[in-house]
Amino acid sequence: GYALLGIEFDSIGRVLRVYIDSAAGILIDDCSRVSYQLSGALDVEDPIAGTYQLEVSSPGLDRPLFTLADFERFKGRMARLQLMNPIHAQKKFKGKLLDVKQDIIVLQENDQMIEIPFAMIDKARLVPEFELAQKG
């Protein structure tokens, strides 16, 4: 009954992060249950050479955005994006998700609309609402 939202692997810190969700939300017991099951499968299949740490997590308030559908779902919300290569000499953006046009994310940063190809996004996360309220 869990949905896999996405996977991140930090090769420097050797951490495999697995994000899960469900209609009822995610509790620590859910993360433990998935971690136990996933650990067994990873030990058998051994897809990552060497040692690493497995973390199973809910998406949290600063939910990572992995797919075009994620960007579509959270249109109107604030997000932070980090790109693999710079656009306009900039790799980090923070703005309002305005639209998704095929594989282009339209972001409003201050008064500027920026079109960012989805393929150029390295990491993307929602900006929690309380963070906006504290700085506003």
Image (cartoon, rainbow, N blue to C red):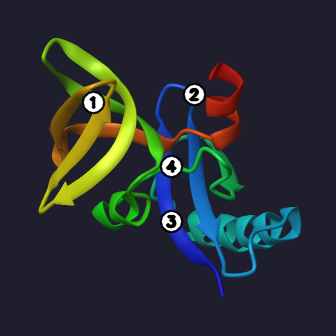
* Residue named by callout 4: 64
Amino acid type, mark 2: Gly
Amino acid type, mark 3: Leu
Q: CA distance from mark 2 to mark 4?
A: 19 Å
Q: Which percent across, then down, holds residue 45?
A: 50, 68
Of the 4 image quadrants, the one containing the N terminus is: bottom right
Considering only order in the chain, which callout, 1 or 2, is on the residue closer to the N terminus?
2
Q: CA distance from mark 3 to mark 1?
A: 20 Å
Q: Nearer the viewer, residue 117 or 98?
A: 98
> Is 10 on the left-hand or right-hand side of 35?
left
Q: Which percent across, then down, holds residue 117?
A: 14, 44
Considering only order in the chain, which callout, 4 or 2, is on the residue closer to the N terminus?
2
Q: Which mark, residue 5?
A: 3
Q: Which mark, residue 83?
A: 1
Quick one: SS at disc 4? loop
Quick one: SS at disc 1? strand
Residue at 54% in and 41% down: 50
Q: Are marks 4 and 3 in contact (CB under 8 Å)?
A: yes
* Residue named by callout 2: 13
